[in-house]
Amino acid sequence: MHQLPLVSFSATRCSGKTVIHFNHDGMIIDGWSHEKLIDELDQFYSDPERAVTPPGICFPDYVRYLEQLPGTEQFQADKAYWMEQAHSMYPRPSLPLLREPSQIKQVRTRQVIRYISQPVWDSITGFAARHGLTPFAVLFTAFGKSILKYCKDDRCLINMPVAVRPQIHPEIGELIGECSNFFLFGFDAMPDSSFVECAARNQQKIAQIMQHNAFFGTDYIRALQKTEGASVAAPIVFTSLIDVPRRREINLKKTYTKTHTSQVWIDAIAMRNKEGIMLSMDCAADLFEESLTDSIGDTFAETLETIHRDPERLTAHAFIGLTHKEQAAIRDCTHADPQGNMPLLSELLLEAYRRYPEHAACIAGGNTRTYAEAFSTADSIAKQLLPLLSGSNSCQTAVFLEKGAQQLYAALACTMCNCAYFPLDIQMPEQQLAGCLKNAGIRVILTNSRWADHLRRLSDITLVNLDSIPSSDGKSIAFQPSAPEDIAYIINTSGTTGMPKSIPLRQDGLVNCLLETRAYCNLTEGDRLLAITNYCHDMSVFDLYGSLISGAAVVFPDAEREKDPCHWAELIAAYGITFWNSVPAFLEILLAAEIPHPETAFASLRNILTGGDWIPVPLAKQIRHSFVNARLTSVGGPSETTVWNIWHTVTDADLQGSFIPYGKPIPHTNYFVLDERGELCPPLTEGIMFVEGMGVTPGYIGLPEENQKKFTLFQGRRVYNTGDRGMYLPEGTVKILGRMDQQVKINGKRIELEGIQEVLQSLPGVCTGAVLVSDHTKALTGFYTARTELDPQTLIQQLKERLPSYMIPAQLVQIPSMPITQNGKVDIPALRHMDVKPLQKAEPAAAPDSETEAALLTLCRELFENPDITPEDDFFVMGGNSITAIRLLSRIRQQFGVTLTIYDILNTPQINQWAALIDQPV
């Protein structure tokens, strides 16, 4: 036996015992024969004088049987049956992979073993008998469902090896050799049917397969490759040896079994042992997370234990649920109490006011205002505002101000009146502004002299000019009565109609976020916060209220330099800024400004919170390197769920990986990652994220249909559908994967592409439209069809009248017809592959008029990676936005030694205009 090249035996002596190693190639010995050989070896080892009886059938006899099969009618009939199945073949399992199998050059395997006790096995056989099932059908269904639980699809192919021992001889069961083959089983999880119904269907399907068993899996694959050129992938194998005659262990006890098959991902074998049943899974180690294959094994074992413990559950439900380990892993994300007793916002603000009256509350333009002064100013505004409001907790007031201390006073005054603080973008087009105010029911706007004339054109709006309000004596500071469920602030976000959606957020949700962040960051009266985030972005809400409840001071950049990274650096150094809160792009810009000795210049910073967009790992490394004393925290959560409600402290381990986790929710918040059936996804399995908690908005203002679409129930609890794809990681944190719809984020601003598309389609002459965003540059490109040729520049000007600058496509392209998918939707991949050429100028571009203009032209071509930019091109047509404007300002300062403002770029958006500003006499 030892001379055979594909079989070997060896023995190892250890601790007075002998371990026998039996290795063989599956080409010559199948699982049945494997068990038979070990049984005979045990018998001979126990009784060396045992008589040997030669078998009545030899392997050559079996081979001759196989050779004559193709000439039989049954073989041809079975071949026709299987070739017909090829048209409805299921895909390979869509399990989450670490890498593509083709990238693995040398396969390593890892074994997962799970044991089923004899009492559980007895329950399984009884359960099967009661429901007219075979034990194999129960095991196979449990395994298939355990695989599909972690797949994107509800169907997959499973390679099902079977013994091929036809009754051509009475002793066919004694034959040693490769007497097996396999069939490709299309496993369907049948999510709308119970486990028992699924098992019954599988059993019926197996019986049908065995009626066509003359045409084996190997024949099937060869035929498909020959006739269809198809490559069939069934890398999950499930072998059952439970029907192999059970051997009586005498002296030899099997302790370890391992298999490896080429191109197999998971090779599972269910077999009997002395304790009951054992499942052994040999898994491709470099293909899967270890926790994934462990969870598959756990799911299989716990499903079978459910039959022993609660069999009725499997007669009523299809979903086999999370394992105990999985439930424990995601507990921090799913078991928070969504309610809580929060103090009132007014109580927190008054406490800080009384404790720190002479401490700095805000610093702007070099001027410092104490808590006493800031509250006094806000109190004067509140006394002017209150008579204009009707009812308690009014949502009738908006704020329209540039960056500065007045933003803080206005927010505080709104809270004093118990009316919602509602900041409006000062760059919002007039038509969009009017529609927003009307939809939200706004009657009063807090503004100043700079914007008063601009706003007087609005009808039915009362303006309160903050420039003309004197400070009060500060002796009668008072807040109107409020309740935790009252609306604290309203924030706008992009809508699918081109009009913004107004989101009201409750006071208790805001207070929860403020208190948790204050504790997490250990904010005190000694802290200084830099308010660089646009006040229309919800992250800015923390700059205002988070500083005020902590006794800290908020530092405002100069309005003319609010987007200037060098100005930020000056403020950090001058005022010892300790807390930074912005989108990642702002940090990237600050680092790109090449501030000298950043480890010294930024030494005062001890907390950096960044969110609203992806945080690339290279950027996180840069931040950690440059801000040596700061803790970097990723914060997130849709605007509909308060400022932020999920966070993650970036670790050294994160910097060695490929992504920064989304994190775990703050207290009183739950993140449910649900599959298409509305069930919790296990870790490493993709689903849609739903949020529950006191921070979730009551609903969009004036949009009942949108509310019905975005808010639903999970296990009887109200949740918000974020539309974000995500998954739980094995340690219980959440990873965000992207969007399900056409919503994108560009530099922290949420943009509904459908909203831009709807406005584009409403323009005169436009028939259909579509908008997409470049993955590389984040520039928007619009496509449209029309019956006549339309000037894209004219259309862009029309869009500017109705949309904010960050929603204007850099380019519009007229196409003959809109590509459509089979289900009638716009074919976005087809649009991406279109050969879009830059807009042709009516006349040749003029040469630069000066050296400055020529240098700016070169700079812009490099910045936008577009060699066709001309001096007359509009900044937005180039693909510009507020973030690229900041980068441009930084480059201009470095190259020309001149400081322009972001408004110089946005309001005079052509290269030749910038050149004139740079060259003008000081």
Image: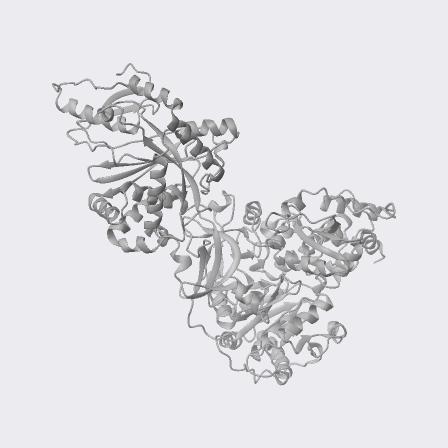
Image quadrant in which the N terminus is located: top left
The answer to whether one can see residue 353 in this image is yes
Between residue 579 and residue 131, name the one nearer to us: 131
Between residue 816 and residue 390, name the one nearer to us: 816
User: Residue at left 85%, top 57%?
Assistant: 921
Q: Residue 211 appears in which quarter of the rendering? A: top left
Residue 80 at x, y = what percent? Answer: 44, 32
Residue 258 at x, y = what percent? Answer: 32, 31
Q: Is residue 399 above or below residue 227?
A: below
Residue 351 at x, y = what percent? Answer: 49, 76
Image quadrant in which the C terminus is located: bottom right
The answer to whether one can see residue 107 in this image is no
Q: Is residue 668 above or below residue 96?
A: below
Looking at the rendered structure, the number of numbered marks drawn on it comes to 0
Between residue 684 and residue 605, name the one nearer to us: 684
Q: Residue 78 appears in which quarter of the rendering? A: top left
Residue 528 at x, y = what percent? Answer: 57, 64
Between residue 113 and residue 597, name the one nearer to us: 113
User: Residue at left 70%, top 60%?
Assistant: 759
Q: Is residue 194 above or below residue 358?
A: above
Q: Is residue 273 above or below residue 600?
A: above
Residue 371 shown left or right of residue 561 in the figure: left
